[in-house]
Image: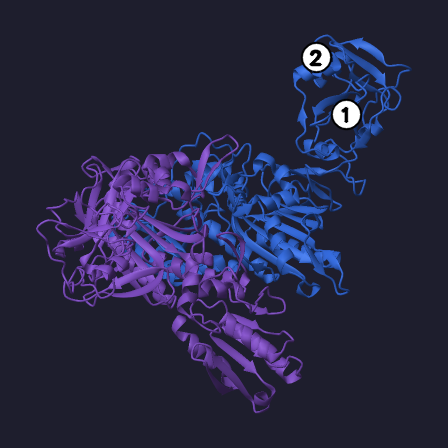
Chain colours: A blue, B purple
């Protein structure tokens, strides 16, 4: 990237100090306040000049790391013929999340959410022989998903920039090799961007395939919850399993279930308090419907259902909860009194694996104002399946080492890599000729990385109450030169001289040449978060000294005029 | 851009020698054959690795020149709320060329064809004071236009990459200043890309405003025709005017128009041959309709109507010719016999300015098989308006110096810059406060440059029958190392050594390490058009010599092994 220098008075960098009313998380607020982005409409943003510079620096790091592992850059279209999605089956799967449009000849297109279909279509007509494999291609391109609830600024936008890569192989070993290289590249990208991160097992969502990992940047207000154990196990909340923990009090099994009046007691808290029991003695029955059946999810009273895991077990991504009326119709009771005993025969029951540790259970009686005690699974009701459908919790026992306990962190998902296997090549008939002349489907991998989202994630991890604190490798400008009093001739001259010299030395420089109160300029400086601020004050200058302020450490040092450049060079050396 | 090196056996660079059946012009054929692009669907292309590299090099040059003139890079969205187009009036104006779609909440969007509306919307909420002006922003982004006839590969695509810039001013003088700077930047971009070009006056089309210029790269099979005079006048065919040329023979005016039987004589050629007259004695009457009226265009028999000029005069971009039936209904005669005398009163007549030089005229009689001779304009019929509606022709007199003659060249339009004035700011209510506290609409300019199209234009200007000849500044690779016989150890070792050393010296290198017949490799080398080819042959190597082949000059030279790098450095010096 070309080095740049800008004067604030000429630069389009509109800051403001009010907290934007529709922004919930720090990065969204700060990106608006620091003049990085502006909203055009829900989930659709413009990157202003300063924000664009961060985006470009991230792009450059991503590009260098992709090139380094031999992945070749291409540029695929945004307009995708819908026929391709019908072949892969994802037209249905994406549903309303796919933006669709007709062209002037009434042909249906989708705006690319990812490019598995497009690249598989190209592979089937271009890659004919095992000799051409493996291939790994990537692109950095705007993607589109019509999110039901766009929010958090560029974090969950409907139009966003993603790096996506696709690989084609003749063997699982070859896929494993690229998968590992890609994971390494992702690690390096995040490390180079200055972002603490973890790689976790995750859910394959709308992409598919068996094995997949997410790269999560740690941040207190991140959307994702991740569970990890000292043994090395790490998974996100959609995927993490647990062995639960020993229940303090077990509910005894009774000879036959005993019906108890629980008038007006509906929630777990109410029922257990009323009965003097623990939540771990009670089992919740949550009722859902698919397109053709009703399904009951049974989980412990102290657990939360994972809809992701549950809908995967049920095999229907469109699963939704029954309404209060539908519950009444099915169970004959109000909400809060549903239970597994005596449900209609055609209601499918899925029990969480953690219920296997239960002895007796307290459940709803399917009768308003009543519960059953001492219920035994397998005797009083029989689930159709047992599966892990509850969410893990901090303190649970690790499912891998079976000894450690899981701890929880929050973060932002930036990367997601997948071993797709032959999911797309088989459904789309994409084959090559093997060395024995046999036609075989490609073995594929795909690798996504959120580029515009990284800008927000970096701020989530690096900010304080005053504003952004950019990691040095992706800061939009290296140095902010801040003359305290622009009217003073010596101050102005020194500022101009530094402005020239710093750019000559290879730094991006912003000169705050605005004729404003110093307090106002300092507040803006803290807000936009450039790592180094050179403060030019009359008194220091008279002594031949210049103040360098380190934003992250909130620390100043006075250096001699002639040492300024060298000091800055030393600061940025690790990023060169 | 990072320097790169690639081995052909690992690189995705699929060439072929057959001429693609659906490609009409050289650049389209060569981009497919040289593995630069692949078609996904009509007017929608993927850039493969080699093509992508050219695109990126052009982007970098464009970016550097925009930054140099102080234009600030931003990134606006592709999804545009349709309300903005209703405000500007362009929803109608673009018509079916605008891709439209509904989101999941049934809100209507357009895919951005350009961004006047989006940036004007931002300006009206962000730029409040004259103190913030002027501003000039640009972006490099995929644009969408649903062309009625997508063709010529990326030359006239439905999805393409454009650099678009927008400027906001308080005065015409300030606009003029940026307009001149932008014109200078465009010149430098094209010069740096190695493309001979001319700046011409043009038509404002769907963008609007009064003054605009196109930048046309000369190419024999270019779509645009441009007219120029040694006095400096230059305009494209939609805009060029002319003073015509002295007619060799003038048709005399008769006392009253004389009706002559011209059975079966319909075309200009037939009628003039039949009457022993010259085309310059005859006047053609072409009948069109708008949404609410019929309009006749009168032009000389040796001239062609410019529909662009004509529809602009009529003030309706949707103007279309009458059908044969409609002509019969209007004139009572078959096609070929229409004339201006005796047309229904409510038919508007527009006469080309060149008709002012006519004395008498031969015109259709509005009666099948009959024409009128000796007709006088102003006596026998009176046009509603006189305007330049015919196309200029090579050899016409220059409208500016009135002495020189116009000559014609062909080319590809790459840039188009516009002084918009207040067209968008007034229709969209985008104002700022002037220094006297008065609200005023922004004065605007906009500046487009076709980035993906430049790849094709460069090939149109630089190719021969064997393939592409890349200008050195935008070549995807600087050097092709071609070992004639990869099986020979000395050849292979030298190739590997050069491959390393050249990249170390800062060049992009492609090594043709394929084990193929030399003839095949040489043909591919000519096709992909890298300026320098290093040919490693056993006989030369034994003598310590290496052949450098200059693609453009079709010339080889033998240099000593140790001089290779230096020779290549000298060749690329001008681009550094």
> Viewed as shown, does residue A352 lie left or right of B151?
right
Q: Residue at x 14, y 44 (%)?
A: B382
Q: Residues within 10 Å of mark 1 (few under 14, many from 20)?
A: many
Q: Quadrant of the C terminus of chain B?
A: bottom left
Residue B530 visible in the current orientation: yes
Q: Are marks 1 and 2 on the same chain?
A: yes
| Residue labelled with disc 2 | A334
Residue B186 visible in the current orientation: no
Chain bearing tag 2 is A
The percent coordinates of residue B353 (x first, y second) are 17, 52
Disc 1 versus disc 2: distance between alpha carbons? 17 Å
Helix, strand or loop status at disc 1: strand
> Viewed as shown, does residue B15 lie left or right of B75?
right
Q: Earlier in the sequence, mark 1 or mark 2?
A: 1
Q: Residue at x 17, y 55 (%)?
A: B354
| Residue labelled with disc 1 | A298
Closer to the camera in the image, A481 or A267: A267
Are the two marked residues, 1 and 2, in contact with CB atoms closer than 8 angstroms? no
Quadrant for residue B460, please give it: bottom left
The percent coordinates of residue A326 (x first, y second) are 68, 17
Instruction: Using the image, tell me which numbered label, if any, was put on residue B235.
Output: none
Closer to the camera in the image, A275 or B309: B309
């Amino acid at each position: 990237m070309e080095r740049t220098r800008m004067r604030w008075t000429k630069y389009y960098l509109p800051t403001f100090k009010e907290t934007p009313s529709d922004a919930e998380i720090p990065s969204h607020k700060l990106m608006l306040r620091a003049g990085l982005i502006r909203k055009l409409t829900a989930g659709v943003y413009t990157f202003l000049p300063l924000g664009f510079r961060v985006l470009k620096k991230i792009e450059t790091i991503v590009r260098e790391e992709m090139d380094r592992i031999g992945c070749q850059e291409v540029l695929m279209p945004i307009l995708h013929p819908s026929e391709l999605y019908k072949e892969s089956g994802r037209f249905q799967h994406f549903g309303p999340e796919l933006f669709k449009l007709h062209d002037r000849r009434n042909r249906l297109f989708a705006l690319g959410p990812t490019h598995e279909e497009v690249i598989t279509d190209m592979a089937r007509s271009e890659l004919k022989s095992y000799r051409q494999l493996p291939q790994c291609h990537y692109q950095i391109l705007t993607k589109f998903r019509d999110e039901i609830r766009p929010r958090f600024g560029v974090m969950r936008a409907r139009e966003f920039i993603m790096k996506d890569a696709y690989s084609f192989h003749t063997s699982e070993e070859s896929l494993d090799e690229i998968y590992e290289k890609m994971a390494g590249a992702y690690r390096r990208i995040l490390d180079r961007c200055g972002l603490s991160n973890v790689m976790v097992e995750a859910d394959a969502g709308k992409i598919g395939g068996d094995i997949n990992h997410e790269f999560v940047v740690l941040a207190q207000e991140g959307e994702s919850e991740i569970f990890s154990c000292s043994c090395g196990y790490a998974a996100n909340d959609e995927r993490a399993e647990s062995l639960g923990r020993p229940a303090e009090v077990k509910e005894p099994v009774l000879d036959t279930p005993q019906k108890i009046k629980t008038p007006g007691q509906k929630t777990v808290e109410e029922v257990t308090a009323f009965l003097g029991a623990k939540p771990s003695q009670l089992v919740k029955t949550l009722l859902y419907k698919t397109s053709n059946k009703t399904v009951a999810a049974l989980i412990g009273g102290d657990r939360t259902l994972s809809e992701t895991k549950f809908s995967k077990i049920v095999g229907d991504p469109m699963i939704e909860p029954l309404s209060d009326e539908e519950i009444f119709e099915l169970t004959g009771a109000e909400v809060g009194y549903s239970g597994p005993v005596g449900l209609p025969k055609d209601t499918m029951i899925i029990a969480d694996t953690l219920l296997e540790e239960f002895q007796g259970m307290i459940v709803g009686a399917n009768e308003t104002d009543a519960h059953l005690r001492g219920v035994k699974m397998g005797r009083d009701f029989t689930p159709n399946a047992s599966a892990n459908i509850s969410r893990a919790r901090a303190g649970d026992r690790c499912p891998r080492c079976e000894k450690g306990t899981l701890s929880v962190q929050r973060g932002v998902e930036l990367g997601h890599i997948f071993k797709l296997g032959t999911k797309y090549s088989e459904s789309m008939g994409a084959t090559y000729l093997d060395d024995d002349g046999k036609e075989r489907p490609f073995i594929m991998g795909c690798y996504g990385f959120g580029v515009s989202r990284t800008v927000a994630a970096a701020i989530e991890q690096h900010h304080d109450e005053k504003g952004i604190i950019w990691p040095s490798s992706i800061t939009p400008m290296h140095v902010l030169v801040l003359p305290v009093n622009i009217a003073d001739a010596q101050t102005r001259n020194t500022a101009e001289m530094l402005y020239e010299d710093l750019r000559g030395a290879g730094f991006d420089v912003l000169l705050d040449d605005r004729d404003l109160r110093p307090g106002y300029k300092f507040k803006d400086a803290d807000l936009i978060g450039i790592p180094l601020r050179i403060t030019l004050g009359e008194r220091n200058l008279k002594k031949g000294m210049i103040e360098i302020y380190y934003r992250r450490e909130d620390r100043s040092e006075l250096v001699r005029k002639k040492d300024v450049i060298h000091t800055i060079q030393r600061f940025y050396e690790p990023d060169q």
